[in-house]
């Protein structure tokens, strides 16, 4: 009897200890899930400043670092964050200091385009979750390397196409999928707005407050010019992707989403160039690009995607400065990410108008942070955005070379055209610490 009592006591004790351990583990997980996520902002100018302000006010995060190579901008960013949160983040100019700090869980990367992929890959390899601004990459090859970095490190990688987390956009895309205008065979995106002339300049010494060597990073060294910084770097081959990759990618992403394609196109043709601006801008101010998705090549399986760009345009096209159109077998949808969408039936009969409220940046932040806590893929996962950003790269390649491209979606290779295929990648600064492996 005593032995039975002793055995029963030991079993009950073991069960109690097991339950306590499980409770402690559950408590630790709950605590971890509710603790603020420690984050950093790399590049707090322009869109980066919008991220900085939202993060500084967000009680679900702790903004630990701001990283910026321009000391004037860095000081201003730290000051802004402190005013909004009550605590000053640490200001650094070298992103490696952020990556080396194991307490940092996630980074927002809002650098110029040429830094997006190198910084994101370094961050993921350092164990950080990544929110990276659009376009996700400077060239097509980098996008594939970003996907690989996110997957091998089991990190969340969200791209800053915030319409993916905007309620009425999600609703519109679902309605297209549900067949509100029949089968969508063709979609179109346009970037029709008035940009400014960036002028012409000569090489000169960079200002003392800017670490220009760090700013250039892994890109080939190119002399500093006044009309390349700030912001105007996007019009130079070395740093940016033109306005197709800058503003166009937002609507390209939405148009591809509504078209329902989840691979690369097989054929790309384009015309365009500089029709209006007589300045140092290298990328086209005017483009017309057509993409074809062959699928299995059967009637009913092919899809066509069109992109139009006129960044000297003083008018609003089809009610939207930047917008999309979807052409279905039973109707049409005209969509704008800021103002809503209209659905038309046969003979242009207006069926319904839905108002929009504009892209929801806070919702996109919330989706990213939720994905980190729950270990799921975010709304604008890197694999999704790579397909959209690749359209910008392929469209720009076709425009630059003036040739129709045949593209292998699986191997991500331009067939039979080595000059065009070289532009799938880029040259990097030899020996630089941020050059991605596998480029």
Image: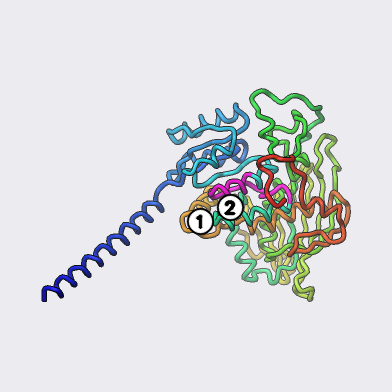
| Magenta range | 119-139
Residue 158 has which mark? 2
Density class for disc 1 (Cα within 10 Å; few <14, some 14-19, many ≥20) is some
Is the N terminus in the top left, top right, bottom left or bottom right quadrant? bottom left
On the question of residue 40 being in view, the answer is yes
Residue at 75% across, 30% down? 224
User: Is residue 420 found inside the magenta-colored segment of the image?
Assistant: no
Image-quadrant location for residue 92:
top right
As drawn, the label of residue 371 is: 1
| Contact between labelled residues 2 and 1, with CB atoms less than 8 Å apart | yes
Residue 321 visible within the image = no
Say left or right for 107 vs 257. left
**349 left or right, relative to 80:** right
Residue 10 coordinates in the image, percent (x, y): 20, 68
Looking at the image, which residue sits at the far front? 3
Locate residue 306: give its quadrant.
Answer: bottom right
């Amino acid at each position: 009897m005593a032995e039975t009592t002793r055995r029963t006591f030991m079993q009950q004790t073991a069960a109690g200890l097991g339950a306590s351990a499980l409770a402690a583990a559950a408590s630790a997980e709950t605590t971890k899930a509710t603790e603020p996520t420690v984050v950093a902002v790399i590049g707090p100018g322009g869109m980066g400043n919008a991220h900085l302000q939202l993060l500084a006010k967000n009680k679900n995060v702790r903004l630990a670092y701001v990283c910026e190579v321009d000391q004037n901008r860095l000081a201003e960013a730290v000051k802004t964050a402190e005013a909004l949160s009550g605590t000053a983040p640490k200001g650094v100019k070298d992103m490696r200091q952020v990556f080396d700090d194991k307490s940092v869980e996630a980074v927002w990367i809002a650098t110029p385009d040429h830094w997006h992929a190198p910084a994101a890959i370094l961050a993921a390899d350092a164990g950080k979750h990544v929110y990276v601004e659009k376009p996700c990459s400077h060239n097509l090859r980098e996008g594939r390397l970003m996907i690989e970095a996110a997957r091998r490190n089991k990190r969340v990688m969200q791209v800053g196409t915030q319409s993916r987390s905007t309620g009425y956009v999600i609703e519109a895309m679902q309605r297209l999928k549900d067949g509100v205008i029949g089968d969508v065979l063709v979609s179109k995106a346009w970037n029709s707005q008035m940009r400014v002339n960036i002028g012409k300049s000569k090489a000169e010494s960079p200002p003392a407050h800017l670490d220009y060597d760090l700013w250039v990073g892994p890109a080939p060294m190119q002399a500093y010019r006044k009309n390349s910084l700030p912001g105007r770097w996007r019009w130079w081959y070395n740093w940016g992707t033109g306005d197709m990759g800058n503003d166009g990618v937002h609507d390209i992403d939405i148009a591809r989403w509504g078209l329902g394609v989840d691979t690369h196109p097989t054929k790309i043709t384009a015309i365009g160039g500089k029709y209006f601006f007589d300045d140092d801008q290298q990328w086209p101010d005017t483009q017309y690009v057509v993409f074809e998705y062959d699928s299995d090549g059967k009637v009913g399986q092919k899809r066509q995607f069109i992109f139009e760009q006129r960044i000297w345009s003083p008018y609003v096209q089809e009610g939207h400065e930047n917008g999309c159109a979807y052409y279905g077998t039973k109707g049409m949808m005209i969509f704008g990410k800021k103002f809503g969408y209209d659905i038309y039936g046969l003979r242009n009969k207006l069926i319904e108008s839905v108002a929009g409220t504009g892209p929801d940046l806070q919702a996109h932040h919330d989706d990213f942070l939720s994905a980190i806590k729950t270990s799921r893929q975010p709304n604008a996962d890197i694999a999704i955005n790579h397909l959209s950003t690749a359209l910008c790269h392929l469209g720009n390649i076709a425009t630059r070379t003036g040739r129709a491209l045949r593209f292998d979606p699986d191997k991500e290779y331009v067939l039979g055209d080595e000059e065009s295929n070289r532009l799938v990648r880029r040259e990097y600064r030899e020996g630089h610490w941020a050059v991605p492996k596998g480029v």
